[in-house]
């Protein structure tokens, strides 16, 4: 569980490091793959709880339409 923005920042930095060594061909039992998977889940849960994505409001949608 991520408890604050400092932990979130540190974990995001670690994810960036892991993305440099984990690729599509990395086995799912590789320690770096497992760590990346776990940390990514923690970040997703934290972001969902602290930075929820709102549905766009009508003026925002109209800007996106042609």
Image (cartoon, helix red, strand yellow):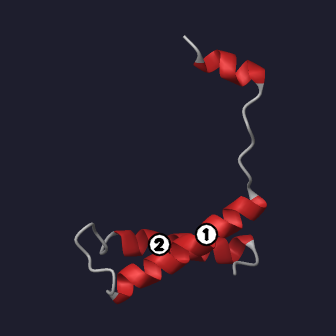
Q: Residue at x 67, y 16 (%)?
A: 62
Q: Residue at x 61, y 74 (%)?
A: 42
Left or right, 6 with respect to 15, comes to: right
Q: Quadrant of residue 51?
A: bottom right
Q: Which quadrant of the rendered structure holds the N terminus? A: bottom right
Crowding near pointer 2: few (<14 within 10 Å), some, many (20+)?
many
- The numbered dot on residue 43 is 1
- The numbered dot on residue 11 is none
Question: Which x, y percent locates residue 14?
Answer: 48, 76
Q: Residue at x 37, y 79 (%)?
A: 33
- Contact, CB < 8 Å: mark 1 with mark 2? yes
- The numbered dot on residue 15 is 2
Question: Which x, y percent locates residue 30?
Answer: 32, 86
Secondary structure type for disc 1: helix
Left or right, 16 with respect to 43, comes to: left
Question: Which x, y percent locates residue 18?
Answer: 39, 75
Q: Residue at x 75, y 74 (%)?
A: 4
């Amino acid at each position: 569980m991520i408890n604050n923005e400092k932990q979130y920042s540190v974990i995001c930095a670690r994810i960036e490091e892991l993305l440099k060594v984990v690729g599509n061909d990395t086995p799912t039992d590789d320690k770096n793959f497992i760590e990346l998977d776990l940390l990514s889940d923690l970040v997703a849960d934290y972001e969902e709880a602290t930075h929820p994505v709102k549905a766009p409001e009508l003026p925002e949608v109209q800007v996106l339409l042609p």
